[in-house]
Image: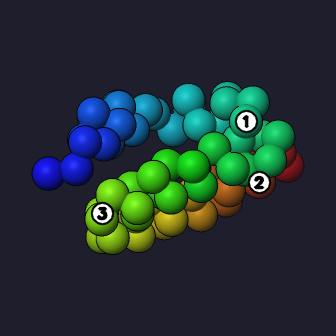
Amino acid sequence: MPKSIPKIQQFQQLKLVDFLSNKKLKKNGRFLNHYTCTLASAGYKSYNRGLVNLESSLKIVALGQAK
């Protein structure tokens, strides 16, 4: 198994509020991309797709709150 499993567990513990309040996400939107790339390189293709969907949802929620 890949050594990045603790990172996956850590990612799963993050909440939506954590993402929306994260300055990195507000600043350049690359916070989630870092995790999707990490998981994809570890061979978690299906998990990576889930994170991409999550990222899209977060952007929609963030836009809704901005209005």
Q: What is the three-letter code of the residue carrying label 3?
A: Tyr
Badge 1 or badge 2: first in the primary sequence? 1
Q: What element does badge 1 sit on?
A: helix
Check disc 3: other Cα within 10 Å, few if <14, some if 14-19, many if 20+: some
Q: Point out the frontmost of discs 1 and 3.
A: 3
Asked if 38 appears above or below 40 in the picture, the reply is above
Q: What element does badge 3 sit on?
A: loop
Q: CA distance from mark 3 to mark 2?
A: 29 Å
Asked if 38 appears above or below 9 in the picture, the reply is below
Residue 33 as seen in the image, left or right of residue 12: right
Rendered image quadrant of residue 18: top right
Residue placed under numbered mark 3 in the picture: 44
Q: Which residue is at a point 68% across and 56% down the rendered structure image? A: 59
Residue placed under numbered mark 1 in the picture: 24
Residue 41 as seen in the image, left or right of residue 16: left
Q: Which residue is at a point 69% across and 50% down the rendered structure image? A: 30
Q: Residue 57 — which label? A: none
